[in-house]
Image (cartoon, coloured by chain):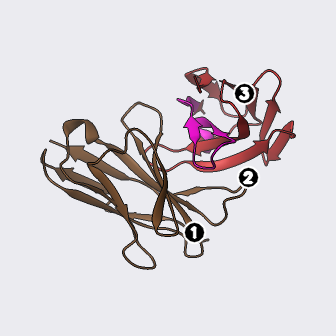
Chain colours: A red, B brown
């Protein structure tokens, strides 16, 4: 079954600290993996996208990694800011269709001052 | 920066009524999508649309749902006879090319409440 599992469900850290969010998937055949940031009541915003051959991708303080062998990805946030408080969603697309995308449940990140 | 817009931002309706959710995708985009997110749950794909026809739909997208691009700018989702379980946030998204790595841009969503 094609699934995307994320951990932890929620995370609270102090401003300025780093954190790492995890994503495991069983989607096959694999096309690409994206990390989205979703503020409460807003649409998801793309942070990074990685295809099969890419191991790491950075976007400012966000760094995503992908291990296609173990089907795991992580999103590392450096020097967190209050504005990083949001849900972070891992999304995997199946190769068979550009529209067949599967969302994880997200990690709810709260940054405390 | 161009963005996807959606109207209304909130909609309250009675069970059994028809609702139309509207989206204006980014102007040069060709591929359009609707998603929904029930409160506290993950985002779910509903339908994709290209070249004035549905290219793919999920099992959620049954006969109660329809999509239309009535003119060159709007992309609508119609729910014919709403049910309580249709209460959710509905997101529209668009992108300009159907290539690997092409980003979908999401609108801010319409929160639908069916009473």
The chain letter under disc 3 is: A
Is A54 positioned to the left or the right of B73 in the image?
right
Q: Is residue A18 visible?
A: no
* Viewer-nearest of discs 3 and 2: 2
**Dots 3 and 2 on the same chain:** no
Is A9 positioned to the left or the right of B59 in the image?
right
The chain letter under disc 2 is: B
In the rendered structure, which disc, 2 or 1, sits on the residue that comes first in sequence? Answer: 1
Q: Is residue A102 magenta?
A: yes
Task: Please give the residue where the numbered disc 1 appears in the rendered image.
Answer: B30
Nearer-the-camera pick, B6 or A21: B6
Residue at 68%, 30% (x, y): give it: A28
Residue A9 circle label? none
Determine the image quadrant of residue B76: bottom left
Residue at 45%, 79% (x, y): give it: B72
User: In x, y percent, where is residue B90?
Assistant: 38, 49
Task: Determine the secondary structure under disc 2.
Answer: loop
* Viewer-nearest of discs 3 and 1: 1
The chain letter under disc 1 is: B
Q: Residues within 10 Å of mark 1 (few under 14, many from 20)?
A: some
Task: Determine the secondary structure under disc 3.
Answer: strand
Task: Please give the residue where the numbered disc 2 appears in the rendered image.
Answer: B101
| Placement of B10 over or under A109, stated as above or below | below
Task: Please give the residue where the numbered disc 3 appears in the rendered image.
Answer: A19
CA gap, disc 2 and disc 1 = 15 Å
Nearer-the-camera pick, A19 or B66: B66
Q: Residues within 10 Å of mark 2 (few under 14, many from 20)?
A: some
Determine the image quadrant of residue B6: bottom left
CA gap, disc 3 and disc 1 = 37 Å
User: In x, y percent, where is residue B57?
Assistant: 45, 47
Where's the C terminus of chain A, which quadrant?
Answer: top right
């Amino acid at each position: 079954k094609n699934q995307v599992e994320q951990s932890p469900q929620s995370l609270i850290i102090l401003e300025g600290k780093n954190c790492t969010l995890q994503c495991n998937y069983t989607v096959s055949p694999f096309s690409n993996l994206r990390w989205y940031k979703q503020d409460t009541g807003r649409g998801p915003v793309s942070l990074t996208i990685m295809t099969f051959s890419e191991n790491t991708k950075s976007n400012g303080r966000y760094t995503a990694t992908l291990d296609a062998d173990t089907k795991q990805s992580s999103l590392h946030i450096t020097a967190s800011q209050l504005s990083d408080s949001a849900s972070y969603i891992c999304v995997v697309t199946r190769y068979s269709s550009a529209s067949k995308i599967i969302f994880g449940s997200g990690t709810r990140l709260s940054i405390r001052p | 920066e161009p963005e996807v817009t959606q109207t209304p931002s909130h909609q309250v309706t009675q069970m059994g009524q028809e609702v139309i959710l509207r989206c204006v995708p980014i102007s040069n985009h060709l591929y359009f999508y609707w998603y929904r997110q029930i409160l506290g749950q993950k985002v779910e794909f509903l339908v994709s649309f290209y070249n004035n026809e549905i290219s793919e739909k999920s099992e959620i997208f049954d006969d109660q749902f329809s999509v239309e691009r009535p003119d060159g700018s709007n992309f609508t989702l119609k729910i014919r006879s709403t049910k309580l379980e249709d209460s959710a946030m509905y997101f529209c998204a668009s992108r300009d090319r159907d290539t690997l790595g092409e980003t979908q841009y999401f609108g801010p969503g319409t929160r639908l409440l069916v009473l």
